[in-house]
Image (cartoon, rainbow, N blue to C red):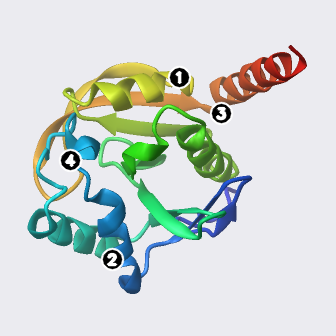
Amino acid sequence: MALPFDSQPDLSGGRLRIRPLLSNDLEDLYLAASAPEIWAGHPSTDRYRREVFEPYARTLLESGGTLVIIDRAENRIIGCSRYYVSPDQPESISIGFTFLHHSRWGGGTNFELKRLMLDHAFLTFSEVWFHISPINVRSQHATKKLGAEYIGNAVLDLSGQPSHWMCFRLSKKAWELTCHDRSWSSESAARK
């Protein structure tokens, strides 16, 4: 029998801490989300505007499963992500609704975030799903780098209205291979 899944853990890595989103985090979360670059490749390109972001943030707070991403050195919120159960995969867990401040793109921040979340999820589940907008190319590439495979498209209601999503599945085995390859690559680079 599988253990119950804690969708709001408090986890720490080398540079990041993730913990449940609290109501008093909303202003700091908005500051992390207020750059237009963050939302440029996203279906909601104007989410950097306060009047658009605030209702979205309240929805994240009310939904449960939303985690803020904190830079441990600066003790500052730099984004958020969320565990959720998708209607097409009710026996699995999904990760999404993730954004990082654009100053954290291109480094190891997304991988560390996903490593914390995926390692936690794989204690309970054998696969994790990602649902990505067809226009969000940045997230599609980042998800493939984790070892996830594109399964197909679906129309799903993940946030209050049915939308088109690209569906990616990551098995525990594929994740273990990605982590092994990434560790090997990091060790090799460190020796050079």
At horizontal 19% and vertical 27% (from top left) the residue drawn is: 135
Viewer-nearest residue: 109 or 11: 109
Mark 1 and mark 2 lie on one chain; the one further toward the N terminus is 2
Q: Which residue is mark 2?
A: 26
Q: Position of residue 190 (x, y in %)?
A: 84, 23
Give, as a three-letter code, the residue at label 4. Answer: Pro
- First in residue order: circle 4 vs circle 3: 4
Element under label 2?
Answer: helix
Query: Tag on residue 36?
Result: 4
> Who comes first in sequence, dot 4 or dot 1?
4
Tell me the quadrant of the picture where the C terminus can be found: top right
| Above or below, 191 relative to 164 | above
Q: Which residue is mark 1?
A: 145
Q: Which residue is mark 3?
A: 172
Q: Position of residue 67 (x, y in %)?
A: 48, 65
Residue extending farthest to the bottom is: 24
Q: CA distance from mark 2 to mark 3?
A: 33 Å
Q: Cβ–Cβ below 8 Å for labels 4 and 3?
A: no
Query: Contact (CB < 8 A) between labels 1 and 3?
Result: no
Q: Which of pointers 2 and 3 indicates the residue nearer the eye?
A: 2
Task: State the CA–CA distance, disc 1 to disc 2.
Answer: 30 Å
